[in-house]
Image (cartoon, rainbow, N blue to C red):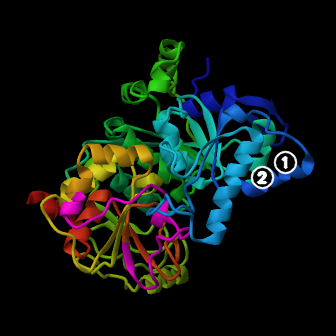
């Protein structure tokens, strides 16, 4: 019998029909929607007079446009308010479950899906959001889709997709003190480039990956898209099952034990063939930070910006990126002043991330030159942070725990970074203007963000951990 990869096993079992010389008709188990990419899709359904095919397989939340303060008040921005209202209207009309603003289960779509037990191993999952790859941490085939495809899934619970190639990334060795899952994926992207996995679905494995928490695995899979991959996944194991067993809606299922047995069998066979493979040693990875305008332009925090004669994106593009950031080749940015620090997003807005940040700033004070946005990824994360006293630790250090939302990951809400200002951000993209027109984003881990927040400059978190 031909050995199968985990990706093949899930993908092939969801094919409704294969079109000769064309795409597969792929059945989708779970569809997530939010207020930004769904309005036009619903309009398309209305214009054609057709219903949502399987409303119970779609889950909605408001996250991109919502404010992270005063959520009990009407949203001030007219367009944002309209989009959130339209989402609620569409969900009522089509019988879709919505976790809207002020719902106790509200939050970023890629945070609440796993924590509420909607994301389960072996599923196919889509959302009109590129970072749907996050759910691959549970051993799923999860990927982002466009608005027209959102309409297709709403109408048929299926999607037309060409099957991607397969890549395996092995990370062995022990992750060093001060290094997080965010540093691991930033290191991988810096080595493979922002398009090094284009056309592939990536499976992550190896000792360092297996030793990560589910939060860490979600961070890894979340940023797969930032090296061009269609998605990323990690086989379910005891860590996955332990996480899912803590969710009441999962644990109370009548078929729970049968599901666990099935989940444990979902893995790549020995000898399964991948189209491309890469290996990394976790012991070589140091705290990372980006210096340019794509996530592939990253380096160890104590290194200098590379001096190069060529670059995968082109030397002109490389120089333009550095000019935008105000940096020069050969420059060290360790010690460079920062203006903003953002902790949050679907990459690093989970309880583990807030714990790491709070532990780093405990007993210290926020630097006077820094504006900090500390944003939980969901209402559940917010409440857990309060229950654990993290909000008090943050307050004592001069920080404020805000309310959940996508916040300063992208400039679709009030949490924008002003033009020319430097932001150390735990989000996933550092494109020009991503956090606000003219903003300058440096991607980093929660530990590196915390170190910058209390020193007012780019700081190696290992220096503070020594203290």
Residue displayed at 31% across by 78% down: 338
Question: To which quarter of the image does residue 204 belong?
Answer: top left
Q: Are marks 2 and 1 in contact (CB under 8 Å)?
A: yes
- Residue indicated by mark 2: 41
Q: Element under label 2? A: helix
Query: Is 229 placed left or right of 13 in the picture?
Result: left
Q: Single out the residue that lies furthest toward the front.
A: 73
Quadrant of image for the C terminus? bottom left
- Camera-nearest residue between 275 and 210: 210
- Residue 37 % position (x, y): 68, 56
Magenta span of residues: 394-423
Return the residue at label 1.
45
Q: Work out whether residue 331 or residue 108 is closer to the camera in this orientation and state it.
A: 108
* Image position of 46 with respect to 321: above or below: above
Q: Is residue 282 left or right of residue 39?
A: left
Name which quarter of the figure residue 56 lies in. top right
Density class for disc 1 (Cα within 10 Å; few <14, some 14-19, many ≥20) is some
Give the SS element for disc 1: helix
Q: Position of residue 417 (x, y in %)?
A: 44, 76
Direction from residue 424 to residue 45 in the image, left or right: right
Please report the residue visible at 26 percent of the width from the left and 56 percent of the height from the top: 357
Query: Callout 2 environment at 10 Å: few (<14), some (14 to 19), or many (20+)?
Result: some
Residue at horizontal 52 percent and vertical 58 percent from the top: 226
Gap in Å between the C-alphas at discs 2 and 1? 7 Å
Residue under the point 41% across and 78% down: 308
Q: Is residue 419 magenta?
A: yes
């Amino acid at each position: 019998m031909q050995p199968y990869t985990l990706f093949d096993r899930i993908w092939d079992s969801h094919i409704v029909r294969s079109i000769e010389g064309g795409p597969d008709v792929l059945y989708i188990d779970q569809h997530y929607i939010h207020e930004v990419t769904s309005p036009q899709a619903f309009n398309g359904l209305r214009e054609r007079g057709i219903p949502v095919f399987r409303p119970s397989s779609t889950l909605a939340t408001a996250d991109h446009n919502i404010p992270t303060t005063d959520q009990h008040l009407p949203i001030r921005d007219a367009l944002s308010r309209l989009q959130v209202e339209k989402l609620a209207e569409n969900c009522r009309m089509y019988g879709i479950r919505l976790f809207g603003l002020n719902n106790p289960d509200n939050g970023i779509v890629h945070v609440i899906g796993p924590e509420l037990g909607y994301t389960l191993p072996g599923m196919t999952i889509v959302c009109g959001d590129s970072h749907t790859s996050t759910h691959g941490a549970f051993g799923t085939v999860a990927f982002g889709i466009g608005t027209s495809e959102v309409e297709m899934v709403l109408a048929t619970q299926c999607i037309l997709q060409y099957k991607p190639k397969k890549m395996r990334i092995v990370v062995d060795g022990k992750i060093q003190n001060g290094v997080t899952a965010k540093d691991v994926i930033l290191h991988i992207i810096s080595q493979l480039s922002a398009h090094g996995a284009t056309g592939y679905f990536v499976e992550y494995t190896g000792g360092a990956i297996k030793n990560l928490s589910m939060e860490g695995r979600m961070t890894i899979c979340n940023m797969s898209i930032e090296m061009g991959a269609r998605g990323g996944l990690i086989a379910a194991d005891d860590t996955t099952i332990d996480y899912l067993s803590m969710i009441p809606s999962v644990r109370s299922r009548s078929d729970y034990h049968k599901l666990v047995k099935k989940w444990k069998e979902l893995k790549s066979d020995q000898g399964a063939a991948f189209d491309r493979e890469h290996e990394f040693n976790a012991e070589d990875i140091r705290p990372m930070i980006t210096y340019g305008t794509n996530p592939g332009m990253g380096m160890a925090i104590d290194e200098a910006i590379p001096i190069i004669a060529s670059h995968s994106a082109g030397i002109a593009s490389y120089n333009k990126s550095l000019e935008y950031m105000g940096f020069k080749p050969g420059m060290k940015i360790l010690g460079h002043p920062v203006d903003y620090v953002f902790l949050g997003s679907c990459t690093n807005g989970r309880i583990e991330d807030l714990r790491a940040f709070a532990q780093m700033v405990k007993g210290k004070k926020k630097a006077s030159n820094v504006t900090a946005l500390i944003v939980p990824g969901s209402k559940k994360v917010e409440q857990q942070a309060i229950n654990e006293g993290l909000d008090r630790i943050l307050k004592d250090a001069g920080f404020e725990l805000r309310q959940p939302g996508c916040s300063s990951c992208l400039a679709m809400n009030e949490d924008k970074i002003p033009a020319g200002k430097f932001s150390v951000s735990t989000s996933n993209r550092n494109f020009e203007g991503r956090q606000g027109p003219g903003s300058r984003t440096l991607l980093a881990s929660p530990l590196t963000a915390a170190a910058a927040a209390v020193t007012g400059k780019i700081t190696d978190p290992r220096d503070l951990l020594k203290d």
